[in-house]
Amino acid sequence: MTKLEVQHAVEQFLYRQADLLDSKQWQDWIDLFTPDGVYWMPPEPSYKTWDGTPAIFAEDKNLMTVRMKRVLHPDAWSQRPLWGTNHVVSNVVVDKAAKNGDLVVRSRFHMMELRRDDVRHFAGQYTHQLKKTKTGYRIKLQRVDMTNAQAAYDYVLQVWV
Amino acid sequence: MLQERIPDLAKFVEPDRVRKEVYTDPQIFELEMARIHEKVWIYCGHESQVPKAGDYATVQVGRQPMLMVRGKDKLVHVLYNRCPHRGNMMCGDRHGNAGEFFRCSYHAWTFQHDGKLRSIPMMESGYAGTRYGKDNPDCNMKQAARVESYRGFVFASLAADGPTLKEFLGESRIAFDDMCDRAPGGEVEVVPNCFRVIQHSNWKIFLENQLDALHPSVVHQSTGRAAHEVEKDIAKKTGKAPLSYHMLSAFATVTIDKWDNFQTLNYPYGHCILTGYMGLRPMDPDTLAYEKVMHKAYGKERTEEILGVNIHHVLIYPGLSVQSPLQQLRAVRPLGVDKTLTEIWHFRLKGAPEPIYRRSLAYYNLVNSPSTMINADDLENFWKCQQGLTSDAGDWVSFGRFHGRDLEKNGVVETGPNMGTSEAPMRNQMKAWARYMGNGR
């Protein structure tokens, strides 16, 4: 693949990742991860690892599955009100490209959320460690450095950003 | 004005119910701040948050923006975050280091860490013959009337008189004793990250929920069930799921009737203890290794005593919720009659092996972080509570569950056998509230 083709492929992948979240296709989103894949949102950019440190999210596929099953449960009271999100992903930079096609990619995101009449905005940087497989990229680590990570949360984050 | 409209606040509280205005009236809120939060002992922070001279952390006590700061004298001081000159806020960051002294960003007045005036630019020429200067205590940053700490947990009271911290805490001291004793080193250290979550509800709604043993199996069913399913899957594949899944699944597997087996102990200042259920003494290798370290530090007998303490939750009125076996602490900062901030911390047991810390961390991340799968449904209910209370369909909020069946001994209210879901904690909190509001103490 040429650099341009890699850039295009990875952008398409990141758009799809965001699209699956916005369209609430939780299982398809979880399937984007490698079997040992982790979704991680550190409290601050200075954190080096999700292992053994406080985290806003630090979820492997099992914990992702708990979250998915929870939001789909009929008695998840917080899921009753209409809510939706809209992600915009941009500024996609390929930081590292290994010979086997694995990538480290940084991008910026902006997510608007509506819940009842309340609008919230979350924005920040994604860092993806992507594994190249026969069926496309898979996420080994999705690091989410949210600019408002340390701000007070008006209500909580119900699903992945 | 309030006194005319509400001549006798005591009438707002009956033994088994309270008027809804107690949760919705902004004037009652102001009175609560003056008579409760700005008088009694309020948690400011842990000493390990400010290890070095000049380290400070800002904290709200009632309506007052305050600073907790470590002095060169090693003492922790609590000051009003305000310059006595023109009223400027001194420290605009949530935490940091002030350096050798505080310096106001507006006109460069400087102060020692204990608040004493250090210098004013051109003090001699500018203030000669005036009432302002080092001799005038009004030119110092004001200190909290009283500051005391218990096992490293710092409290301030903005009233000069009142019970000592130890007297005020009474039996609820066990929150800190239990937490610190579980450390082979006898003390805990804060993990320097605070999660802050805003609730759109009155501060008392959160407090009442903390020891409401009926709500978990209703409110947290979805997460409990989801976690239980995955827990079983993992167990099938690998033999045993990590303890963290149990922390979540217990919300579903501990059913309402089982919650009745627990007990609450309710104290005159409004504090309350809920006896435990978490099953945190499994016989796995990590726990056994930890017990070995404990034996070395305390001996066998004392270790058994410490690990046998059966507590799930301690509520220290009017704004602190402590889960000592998991080293979790939530401080409640009322922001308005229908808006409340919780500040959520966890602690490391000094000298305990890493896997024991990991349990505390797992609970912090799963239950208490901003992505919490537990509190998400609590907050939804708190909001609905606050909204519903604006309705004129009824004037009262009821706390009738097992009313009349509490056991009272020396002012301590205990729930009876198999009445763990009793609304005794709410009744007791409101009784304390009425007393604070009635005579201001």
Image (cartoon, coloured by chain):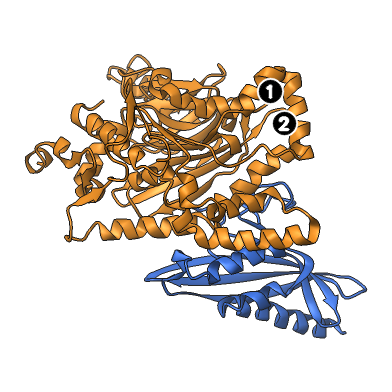
Q: Which residue is mark 2?
A: B352
| Quadrant including the N terminus of chain B | top left
Q: Is residue B115 visible?
A: no
Colour of chain B as rendered: orange
| Colour chosen for chain A | blue
In this view of the protein, which residue sits in the foreground, B317 or A43? B317
Chain at tag 2: B
Relative to B433, B257 lies left or right: right
Q: Residue B147 sits in which quadrant?
A: top left
At 32% from the left and 42% from the top, the residue drawn is: B402
Nearest to the observer: residue A34 or residue B255: B255
Q: Position of residue B12 (x, y in %)?
A: 17, 41
- Residue B87, given in percent of the width and then of the height, sits at 33, 35
Q: Quadrant of the C terminus of chain B?
A: top left
Q: CA distance from mark 2 to mark 1?
A: 8 Å
The answer to whether residue A7 is seen in the rendering is yes
Same subunit, labels 2 and 1: the answer reads yes
Q: Are marks 2 and 1 in contact (CB under 8 Å)?
A: yes
Foreground pick, A135 / B381: B381
Mark 1 lies on a secondary structure that is loop
In the image, residue B405 above or below residue B40? below
